[in-house]
Image (cartoon, coloured by chain):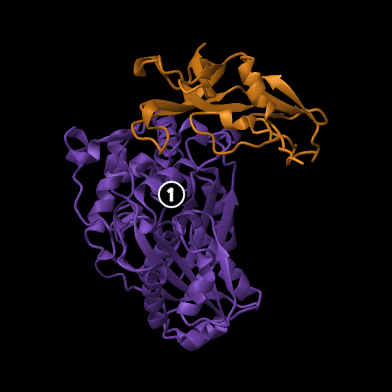
Amino acid sequence: MGKVAIVGVGQSTFVRSYPGSIRELVFEGFKEAMQDAQMSTTDIDASVICSAPEYDKQRSPAGVFAEYLGLNPQPTFYVETLCSSSSTGLKLAYSLVKAGLHDAVAVIGFQKMSEISSSESQERMGRGADIQWESPFGTMMPAYYAMYAKAHMKKYGTTLDDLALIRVKAATYGQLNDRAVYRKPVEFEMFSDPENRMAGPVASPLRVGDCCANADGSSCIVVASEEKAKSFSKKPVWILGVGAATTSVNLAGRDLFTGLSVAEKAAQQAYQMAGVGPKDIDVAEVHDCFTIAEMMAYENLGFANPGEGKELIRAKETYKEGSIPVNVDGGLLSKGHPIGATGGSQIRTIVLQLRDEAGNIQVKNPEIGLVHNIGGVGLYGNVTILGR
Amino acid sequence: MMSQKKDVDDRFKQFGTVSFTSITKTNDFIDYLKDNKVMGTRCKDCGLSFFPPRADCHKCLASNMEWFEVSGKGKLVSYSKLQYAPIGFEKDVPYCIALLDYGDYKVFGRIAKDLTDEDIQVGMEMQTVVNELPSGQLNYVFVKA
């Protein structure tokens, strides 16, 4: 079997409230990816639709999109792993192409979080865990990640200042990204000013500035066989490794609280499959839904030893000019986090980097890039390694 | 003839500030709470202990469980104090969610309201006790050991 490539990438601008329907939102990312791939809809053999369905009013959106995007009568698949749905979609597309079932597959991620009211959204947030044994205590995503932050700080001496540095970095690049929902600068001093919104408590020890924003958005990645890629694309980017893992939903079933076991396991698989290690990665996108999540990602991916992630951000090693640039598109923290679209947006950033088309955030001459995309509170881990 | 009303065992709706499920094979958990006991389940076939309790053992695929009491002391693994809450929990804010490690199993829950921020330290020993909420609902909380 030949290699599998990414031949087209696209995403919508991530916004607070998209002024259109979900099919129109999805069209934006799809159109950009198709134009990028220089393909027409008849070249696409199948679609994979990725989202977290609790935000959708439409039942089974895959069929609606297949029609709207002109992808009938080709088959469609619907996949869901919460915030990592489109990385899971990419893995499915990879498998379909690798198996020889299809030559070109469009992986379409989307979320219109504003589709439901903010009180409906709050109600769903309460069910974002083990609804039988955890949710009755009143749980929320930030509070779970806050428990990891507390454990990390206690064990390794990581500080709130270290976490603030991660947000400052995200905002540095978010300002440069015209697809980002949050384009304002964030200064380190804001976190020590109790009057500043960034310093406001959410779930101790995490503050408003430690959390990413909800957004509406779509993304699209076109995956193709080696043969098809070579006939269509001037610069195919190759999928070198895909890793994925799961763990217990309920925190009571876990053993590690200073990192995400699913990220460690997914990274091991992806590194092994690609035949590379952490030192070979030239540019990375990690799932910074909260600042502590990026800190743990540094360590779980092997960019730093456990407990030493803080040294990377203090020395600015994860800035664009550093030894391992991370989230130089603003990350989830500034770009926004439209659940099902997020993984595709991360993949798009790395593909553009590897094609030397990332504009003002271009890292110097990268050959291998990595995407770390997490679903739930470390429930689903996905790591994808790409090479040019 | 009058239509017969079917008995539904929905005891689990009494668990927590808001219960999102009412029917489970582990409904006896609620009766034990009323008896002031927090209970987990143990597989009679292979001896594996479970908290939260479950009806089925994934190791030996048996559904042959016995109840055991969560007793003694656990260590506080981590916690977080929430300043915002989901719908239905607004009146409880602020409150701390937390995880205790008992060695064989862990317990996820809340820290008792009367503990101050200074009282709570990661690694401290705590106990799990049954708690009745103002609404009459039942849960359990962690107190200083």
Report the chain holding disc 1.
Answer: A
Which element carries disc 1, helix, strand or loop? loop
- Within 10 Å of the Cα at label 1, are there few (<14), some (14-19), or many (20+) other Cα atoms? some
Q: Which chain is orange?
A: B
Tint applied to chain A in the drawing: purple
Q: Where does residue A64 sit, x and y in percent of width and height? A: 50, 73
Q: A385 or B58, which lies in front? A: B58
Residue at 52 percent across and 16 percent down: it is B126
Which residue is label 1 attached to? A303
Q: Is residue A309 left or right of residue A321?
A: right
The quarter of the image holding the C terminus of chain A is bottom left
Q: Nearer the viewer, residue A185 or A62?
A: A62
Residue in view at x 50 percent, y 67 percent: A61
- Asked if residue A124 can be seen in this view, the reply is yes
> How many labels sit on residues?
1
The answer to which image quadrant residue A282 occupies is bottom left
Q: Residue at x 59, y 55 (%)?
A: A269
Query: Disc 1 residue type?
Result: Phe
Expressed as whole percent of the image width and height from the top left, the position of residue A257 reads 50, 35
